[in-house]
Image (cartoon, helix red, strand yellow):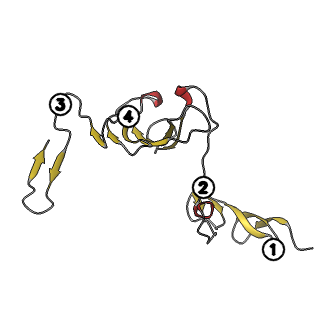
């Protein structure tokens, strides 16, 4: 029978490789600097290569991050946290399940940030796209197709020409 799996320490390249399938092709790499690769020898901290060439939605997916459905409205959010510190600062890219059951797939998207010394619970949603297509800037509940909330100060929208005149319209 053909090879079904392998684990190899590649000493010349200083990396651990694992493989599966009929030819036991390498599918997973870890190198000496801690870089991880899936379907590719990594050149950055995490590198994932989708080798599928099909046109189905499944073939187009590179990665999936999933969270088990929760029945309470306070637990319908999931996010990826990007930051430069090991603590809670940075940006959250996330989703919010707007449905009321696991069979309702109304999912919105958000970007939230922290400012100053705010903690992890103080991330503020700065940009939201609801499942119905409404976009909110500084509001997580847009009332129209585009809803910009500026609070009590300043103009919420500035339109500026890109030429040397820099003409502006403030709304």
Residue 112 location, quadrant = top left
Label 3: state its secondary structure: loop
Image side of residue 22 versus residue 34, left or right: right
Q: Are marks 1 and 4 in contact (CB under 8 Å)?
A: no
Q: Which badge, 3 or 1, comes first in the chain's sequence?
A: 1
**Which of the numbered marks, if any, corresponds to residue 40?**
none
Which residue position holds label 2? 63
Residue 76 location, quadrant = top right
Q: Which badge, 2 or 1, comes first in the chain's sequence?
A: 1
Against 167, residue 91 (above or below) is above
Residue 2 point in image, percent of width and height = 88, 74
Mark 2–mark 4 distance (CA, rounded to whole Å): 26 Å
46 or 124: nearer the viewer: 124
Image side of residue 73 versus residue 146, left or right: right
Against 168, residue 136 (above or below) is above
Q: Which badge, 3 or 4, comes first in the chain's sequence?
A: 4
Residue 145 point in image, percent of width and height = 31, 43
Q: Nearer the viewer, mark 2 or mark 1?
A: 2
**Which of the numbered marks, if any, corresponds to residue 140?**
4
Label 1: state its secondary structure: loop
User: Which residue is most to the right?
Assistant: 1
Which residue position holds label 1? 23
């Amino acid at each position: 029978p053909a090879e079904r799996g392998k684990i190899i320490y590649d000493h010349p390249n200083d990396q651990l490789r694992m493989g599966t399938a009929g030819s036991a092709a390498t599918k997973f790499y870890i190198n000496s600097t801690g870089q991880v690769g899936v379907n590719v020898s990594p050149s950055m901290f995490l590198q994932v290569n989708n080798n599928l060439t099909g046109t189905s939605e499944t073939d187009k997916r590179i990665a999936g991050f999933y969270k088990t459905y929760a029945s309470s409205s306070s637990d319908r959010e999931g996010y990826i946290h990007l930051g430069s510190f090991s603590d809670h600062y940075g940006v959250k890219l996330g989703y919010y399940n707007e449905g009321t059951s696991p069979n309702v797939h109304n999912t919105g998207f958000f970007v939230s940030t922290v400012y100053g010394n705010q903690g992890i619970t103080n991330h503020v949603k700065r940009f939201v796209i609801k499942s119905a297509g409404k976009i909110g800037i500084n509001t997580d509940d847009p009332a129209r197709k585009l809803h910009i909330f500026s609070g009590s100060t300043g103009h919420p929208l500035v339109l500026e020409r890109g030429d040397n005149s820099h003409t502006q319209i403030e709304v």
